[in-house]
Image (cartoon, grey):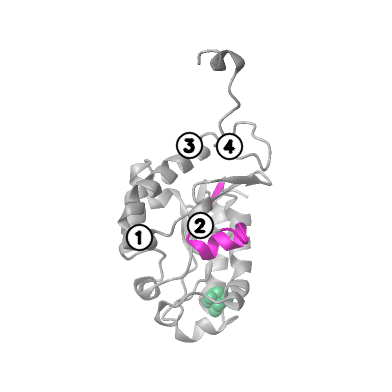
Amino acid sequence: MNQEEQQAALATIAHEVHACTACSLHRGRTQAVPGDGHPNADIMFVGEAPGFYEDKQGLPFVGASGRYLDELLKMIGLTRQQVFITNIVRCRPPQNRDPLRPEIEACTGYLERQLDVIQPKLVATLGRYSMERFFPGEKISKIHGKSKRIGGRIYYPLFHPAAVLRNPSLKPVMEQDFRKMKQLVDEFDANIPDDTPPEDDPPPKPEQLSLF
Ligand code: SF4
C-alpha cells in the first residue's frame, strides 16, 4: 500500500467511525474521534477515550494532555504530524468515566484496521486501558517504559499524559520513557529477535568483570 492508499484507507475507517453505533457511547457523543496523524507513521499512540475538547473538535488529545504530549514529542524531535494518535474507544464516555470492557471490545476492530494500514514500528499505549489490550494483567506502574517486540512490532507502555499532569513527580520518568521510545524506533531495523526486550543490557564481558 502506498501512502495515498493508506490515507484513503484511513479515511474510510474514519468515515465508518463517525457513523458507528456499535456501543452505547455513540448516544452521548458530539462527534466520534477516529484518530489523526501520519498515514505511514513509525509510532502510533493509543490513549484511553476522547474527553470534553476531543469530543467537540473530533481530534485526539487536544486539551491539556494533548499540549503535554506535544511537548514530549518536541523533546524527542517529533511533531504530532509525524506520528498517529488514536484511542482505545473513539466516543466520549459520559462525564469522562472509564471505558467499559464491552465498549473497548466493540471499538477494537477499528484499532486493528488502523494498525494494518499504518504498520507502525512501535505502538505506544497511554494509560492502563490501552496497555491492558497489549499487556493483559500487567500494572502500568510496573511495566511503563519496558517494551516487548512481537510479530516485527514493538509494543511500549507509557503513563497517560493526564496522569502525569495530575502527579508531576512522574514527569522525569515520562521524559525518560519517551527518550527510550525514540531510541527503540531509531534502532528498530537492527536484527532483534521477537520478545527480546531491546533495552536489556547485554551480559558483562569477562574482561570487564576483572576490573573490579
Ligand atoms: S466507541 Fe467505538 S464502538 Fe462505540 S460507538 Fe464509538 S466508534 Fe463505535
Q: Earlier in the sequence, mark 4 or mark 3?
A: 3
Q: Quadrant of ligand 1?
A: bottom right
User: What whole-number distance in Å separates the C-alpha atoms at marks 1 and 4?
Assistant: 28 Å
Residue pointed to by mark 4? 198
At x 54% / y 62%, what residue is drawn?
130
- Residue 88 percent location from the top left of the image: 53, 66
Mark 3 CB near ligand 1 (8 Å cut)? no
**Magenta segment, which residues?**
122-138
Label 1 neighbour load within 10 Å: few <14, some 14-19, many 20+:
some
Left or right, 160 with respect to 120, comes to left
The secondary element bearing badge 2 is classed as: helix
Q: Earlier in the sequence, mark 3 or mark 2?
A: 2
Instruction: Tell me if residue 128 is in the magenta stretch.
Output: yes
- Tell me which amino acid carries mark 1: Gly
- Residue 131 percent location from the top left of the image: 55, 59
- Tell me which amino acid carries mark 4: Pro
Mark 4 CB near ligand 1 (8 Å cut)? no
User: What whole-number distance in Å separates the C-alpha atoms at marks 1 and 2?
Assistant: 20 Å
In this rendered view, identify the residue nearer to me: 40 or 94: 94
User: What whole-number distance in Å separates the C-alpha atoms at marks 1 and 3?
Assistant: 22 Å
